[in-house]
Image (spheres, rainbow, N blue to C red):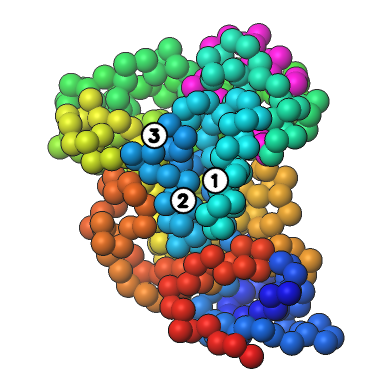
Amino acid sequence: MNRIRIRQGQLIDANGDPGKRSDLFVAGGEIVGIGEAPDGFTADRSIDASGCLVLPGLVDLSVHLREPGADHKASIDSESRAAAAGGITRMLASPATDPICDTPAVVELVTRRARQTQCTRVMPAGALTRGLAGELLTEVSALKAAGCVALSDGGRPVRNALVLRRALDYAATCGLPVILSAFDPDLMAGSRMHEGWVSARLGIPGSPVAAETAALARGLALAEESGAHVHFARLSTARGAEILARARRDGLPVSADVAMHQLFLTEMDVSGFNSQCHVVPPLRSHADREALRQAVADGTIQAICSDHQPHDADAKAVPFVASEPGISAVDSLLPLALRLVDEGLLTLPQLAARLCRGPAEVLGLSCGLLEVGRPADLCIVDPEIPWWHGPGTMRSHGENSPFIGWEFSGRARYTLLGGRLIHAAEPAGMKTG
């Protein structure tokens, strides 16, 4: 049994007092004591967490691992290790792989490769339709039995409303949440950025706000009919946040997340045709960004994700409109969240709620809280470490990020998954006895 004592860390929990410094005791993969060790507990290892924050491990709802099918961009192994270094203990893998994750065989391939890394826990999302083509339903019960914890459209919205309704009915029967992309593919067709005066000045086709609101309206209507738990991925507009808030007040079983970059960047960052800012959904207006920030602060949006999409250099080294969308983001998720705290938008307990408990609840997981009996998925953060984000500090194989060159404060010193150390920035700090 791996028994660990974490000494005098500042325990940060979505339900707790952010100023509490205490010892935390781990055994058998669980938290077995806070403050005082349980009877008969003898530590095999001790971690000095004085001066550090102790958080539940981060849960990321949107990660593209590129394996299988695009191993030249990244791999399950490389991105799992990068995630662990960023304090992420569990991540939901997109089904948009090659082959698509729409059969138990592909699910088993992903989970087997993830087990081989012995690192961050990869949770596959099963494809909502076969081949993500939006026509035929997948065998949801078989995908669940193989290890899928959710169903997803993989960023390829189902155009046929009848097919989507039947998919939601099936998912509700099997008790799996459904993750839908919050954009209408026809209204998004051909666009590369937000529709507005910046897109007009640059001459780049723009995506209207209606691309998001139309998708939300349809998804909410079908969620109400089916009773399925529908989670809208990566909201990007003020209007979308407003529609979601109303639906939640009405008691619909829906939730949503926002990609971290939407809380910092806007359409203005595309000026100069910066391909690193080519994302889907696009970066929107300043007013949209501020509304998303407020929705995160008040809990309307209950989760922040990385929307991690690593690319090879060639994917971005082309004109903006020809570049592939996406940001390599697991390295920057935690430091950007700490910046939200520094800016006064979130408290530390709210940070834990949006990065740990909130996403865990979407997937029905028992992690995300610092309580006795909970899984010992932990992130020990030194909030005072200054560092520059760039190729020399990124662990992901993808170095495509608009945050390269930003100075951050705070990094994960240790990350534990089920009581097992999966990342240690300073191995010498781990003491035995």
Q: Which mark is residue 113?
A: 1
| The residue stretch that appears in magenta | 148-170
**Residue located 78% across and 33% down the image:** 175
Q: Are marks 2 and 3 in contact (CB under 8 Å)?
A: no
Amino acid type for the residue under numbered disc 2: Asp
Amino acid type for the residue under numbered disc 3: Ala
**Label 2 Cα crowd, 10 Å radius (few <14 / some 14-19 / many 20+):** many
The question of residue 162 being in magenta is answered with: yes
Q: Are marks 2 and 1 in contact (CB under 8 Å)?
A: yes
Asked where in the image residue 168 lies, by quadrant, the reply is: top right
| Residue nearer the viewer, 430 or 367 | 430
- Pointer 2 residue: 77
Residue 29, compared with residue 301, is above or below; it is below
Asked where in the image residue 34 lies, by quadrant, the reply is: bottom right
Q: Secondary structure at mark 3?
A: loop
Describe residue 250's horizontal placement relative to residue 377 as left or right.
right
Q: Which mark sits nearer the N-terminus, 3 or 1?
A: 3
**Residue located 57% across and 69% down the image:** 421
Q: Which mark sits nearer the N-terminus, 2 or 3?
A: 3
Q: Which mark sits nearer the N-terminus, 2 or 1?
A: 2
- Pointer 3 residue: 70
| Residue nearer the viewer, 248 or 339 | 339
State how far apart marks 2 and 1 are (Cα).
Answer: 8 Å
